[in-house]
Image: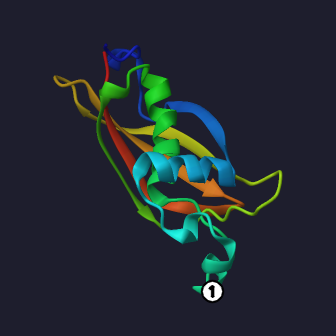
Amino acid sequence: MTAKIAYADVEVGTELPSRTFPVDRARLVRYAGASGDFNPIHWNERFAKDVGLPDVIAHGMFTMAEAARVVTDWTGDPGALVEYGARFTKPVVVPDDDAGAAIEVTAKVAKKLDDEARTVRVDLTVTSAGAKVLGMSRAVVRLA
């Protein structure tokens, strides 16, 4: 599969469609099963509070993966993602209620890196409850 976005059609400043991803305790338990990360801070409210957290928090890698979906959905090909990294700045706190939490993601093309390889850098802004939860969130993608 190849990215559906053409390198020639993308300019610095191009905004990707923003997304909001719901996060609830059931998703965290499913992610724990898939990832093998059963740290109780991700599912046990009493334990999370005992170690000084405000409540259960989402897995950092879960948060990164949800954010990356904005990029892979935009390209139309998960294989177009060449490089991705971020710093964890604040946790995504997930209360035990019907609303849960949300991860809000916006992204834009920050730089055209290589005309021959058709790669661009996409900078992402990732927030939850008004706080930035990922810093230096950047992806390099190869376009068509």
Identify which residue is drawn at 58% across, 42% down: 106
Task: Tell me if 59 is positioned left or right of 141 in this view.
Answer: right
In which quadrant will I find the N terminus? top left
Task: Tell me if 8 is positioned left or right of 58 in this view.
Answer: left
x and y percentages locating residue 25 in the rendered image: 67, 55
Res 90 visible: no
**Amino acid on which disc 1 is placed:** Asp
x and y percentages locating residue 92 in the rendered image: 61, 62
Q: Is 131 drawn above or below residue 12 in the view shown? A: below
x and y percentages locating residue 53 in the rendered image: 62, 79
Identify which residue is drawn at 52% across, 43% down: 66
Q: Is 94 drawn above or below residue 119 in the view shown? A: below
Identify which residue is drawn at 54% across, 51% down: 125
Q: Is 141 drawn above or below residue 76 in the view shown? A: below
Check disc 1 and report the residue beneath it.
Answer: 50
Mark 1 lies on a secondary structure that is helix
Task: Tell me if 28 is positioned left or right of 65 in this view.
Answer: right
Identify which residue is drawn at 64% across, 68% down: 56
Res 105 visible: yes
